[in-house]
Image (tube, rainbow, N blue to C red):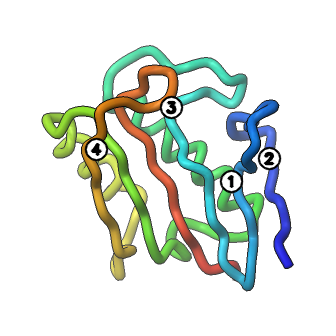
Amino acid sequence: MKTKVFTPKAPSPGSGPFSQAIIANNFVFTQGSIYLTPEGKLLEGTIDEQIHQIMRNLQAILEEADATFSDVVKTTIFVTDMTIYGKVNEIYASYMSDPYPARETVCVKELPLGAKAEISMIAIKK
């Protein structure tokens, strides 16, 4: 059985064929989040501001699913330019604590709406 997660505190998937998150077997699988505001606008600004927006989106989704960053067991980060890796890592680390989730970072050619970064997570529901 799977349960759809939705919060207005994060960008809506709109008419896309995906959910903000799905809960299945006590795991929370989040969507890949770029730096859209909850209103669905791509955040202009520095990479710092953009990564913080991604993390706020994911935090809101996890909270709606009754989970927190401390429940995250796996993270996938996509970037379009490895020169931002250090900044992404620094901001990501400010939200996480030891024991840190398993993680990979993948450099890709493009991301939706021209975003420079996208993050998805898997957490264990409380």
* Residues marked 4 and 3 touching at CB (< 8 Å): no
Is 64 located above or below residue 71 in the figure? above
Decide: few, some or many residues near mark 3? Use Cα within 10 Å; few <14, some 14-19, many ≥20: many
Decide: few, some or many residues near mark 1? Use Cα within 10 Å; few <14, some 14-19, many ≥20: many
Q: CA distance from mark 4 to mark 3?
A: 12 Å
| Element at label 1 | helix
Q: Which residue is mark 1?
A: 61
Residue in the foreground of this view, choosing between 33 and 17:
17
* The disc label shown at residue 35, or none: 3
Q: Amino acid at mark 1?
A: Ile
> In the picture provided, is 113 more to the left or to the right than 59?
left
Q: Which residue is mark 2?
A: 7
In the rendered image, which quarter is residue 49 located in? top left
Q: Which residue is mark 4?
A: 88
The location of residue 54, given as percent across then percent down, is 50, 40
Q: Earlier in the sequence, mark 3 or mark 1?
A: 3
**Mark count:** 4
Q: CA distance from mark 2 to mark 1?
A: 6 Å
Q: Earlier in the sequence, mark 4 or mark 1?
A: 1
> In the picture provided, is 64 more to the left or to the right than 47?
right
Residue drawn at x 35%, y 46% is: 78
* Residues marked 2 and 1 touching at CB (< 8 Å): yes
Decide: few, some or many residues near mark 2? Use Cα within 10 Å; few <14, some 14-19, many ≥20: some
Is 40 located above or below residue 91 in the figure? above
Considering every residue shown, the one lying at the far left of the view is: 83
* Residues marked 3 and 2 touching at CB (< 8 Å): no
On the rendered image, what quadrant is the C terminus found in?
Answer: bottom right
The location of residue 118, given as percent across then percent down, is 44, 42
Residue drawn at x 40%, y 64% is: 96
> In the picture provided, is 108 more to the left or to the right than 55?
left
